[in-house]
Amino acid sequence: MIEAGFAAIGGLALLYFFFRHSERDAVTLLTIWLALLWLMSARWVFAPLGAVGMPAIVFGVGLMLIWVWARLVPRPSLLADGFQPVRLGFGAYASLVLASYAVAQLRPLTELETTSSARALITLASMGGVALLAADGIRDRIRLEKLLKRLVAVATIVGLVGWLQFFVGVDLSPNMRLPGLSQHAPMMGLRDRSLFEQAYGTTLHPIEFSVVMAVVLPLALHFALFEVQRWKRAGWWVAVTVLAVGCLLSVARSGVVAIGIAMPVLALGWGWRWRFNGAVYGLGFVAVMWALVPGLIGTIRGLFQGMDHDPSIQGRRERVPMVIEQLQENGFLGLGPGTFTPEEYFLLDNAYYGVLLELGWPGVFVVIAMLGSGIGAALVAKRYQDPETRHLSQALIAGIAVMPVVMSTFDALSFQTNAGTTYLLLGAAGALWRITLPDRASAAPPAQERSDKSGHAPSLPEGGDTQRE
């Protein structure tokens, strides 16, 4: 009762702040969602709603309702109209999920399958609300950058929670929750891998923690490189350090793979001098971690050298025939969203297998197309823009590009912090595509010059000049 009272007071305070001091736009709503997603564990839920009672999921469903309402209300200033690649990509994925759900209802479903399938639809609506509101509701570049800076800020806080778990053995995550929530699943606690306790921050698992640190790292590096004020630049470099170290503190292969994808993709937008400097700093970072945390780099190296004898790798290989056998029994659109549960089937540990079994082969292609819509939108946003905008586009591409790779290393779509952050980056890419459209149209070279320039934007300055134009 006391907790409910504190929750009501806190809710009223937030409402007052929202209506009195905020701009009351999509960025403000998405900021609240970011705090709910990152700053508390997914194990805390509203008890009557069960597994979908995560505050971030509930709030995300509200964002979807707001997006639908804004589409129906005849006020064009609420949401942007016209073609939006991310909206198209998500629409194709959502349509396939609904079609697969409808087909699944034609066969007998167990109670667990029915519940899990409904949960999958609610989660999809929540994530879609985030992506669509970001893509259509962020009105300008300033507000977009403010949202992305807040993403880096909350990720840095979670990274520091992971630091405490790893270096001190103090776990703050059980206490990071709203009053009135119930624990849906047991708290994970710290896990040992070799000599070290794996950090997981507020996420569900060390693997997820390492991946989301790597996904946000390119954005933190972008703001560190392009910040003009010295004291703010120092703050962004602190964030870069926290996130980069956090990728290693989980002692997980997926985190190393994620950072091995994100940083080279980001470097594709650099000049050769920046790439050389980045390689030197990267080697220096590894050397410092090797010296300050003895055994950590060797343990991570051993995770890759001993893959042939790793039980988790062997288990995944042994499940391949089981997946193929199950796939042959499924229909063209799979078993239906959310219906393939470990309790009634077997553990997958691979997001592609899950999509393949639940949505069929069309699901795999549509998921990749949805991720590709965000990457494509960011690629187009780079054209004929200033160096800072091009680098921001490349940072978004780097973050999104991690997802298609790590989907093969763990069940990436089932972890809400990772999935939610990816959907937010998709929406941000769509917003940047729309925001830069007038500049691209006015700066496009004449038709006779395009054959010479090949339509590519110039790369970043070789000298690494980070000053704003």
Image: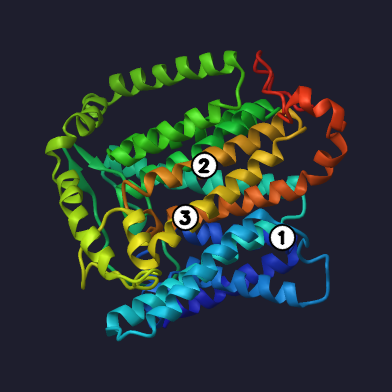
Secondary structure at numbered mark 3: helix
Going by the numbered disc 2, the residue's amino acid type is Gly
Q: Which mark is residue 365?
A: 3
User: Quarter of the image containing the C terminus?
Assistant: top right
What's the CA distance linking mark 1 and mark 3? 27 Å
Question: Is residue 184 found left or right of 153 in the rendered image?
Answer: left
Secondary structure at numbered mark 1: helix
Is residue 299 at least partly visible in the picture?
yes
- Quadrant assignment, res 380: top right
Question: In the image, is residue 88 above or below residue 451?
Answer: below
Q: Position of residue 194 (x, y in %)?
A: 16, 36
What's the CA distance linking mark 1 and mark 2? 21 Å
Q: Which mark is residue 410?
A: none
Going by the numbered disc 3, the residue's amino acid type is Phe
- Residue at the image position 54 percent from the left and 77 percent from the top: 8
Question: Is residue 393 found left or right of 440 in the rendered image?
Answer: left
Q: Nearer the viewer, mark 3 or mark 2?
A: 3
- Quadrant assignment, res 453: top right
What is the crowding at mark 3: few (fewer than 14 residues within 10 Å), some, or many (at least 20)?
few
Q: What residue does disc 2 label?
A: 399
- Residue at the image position 15 percent from the left and 45 percent from the top: 314
Q: What residue does disc 1 label?
A: 137
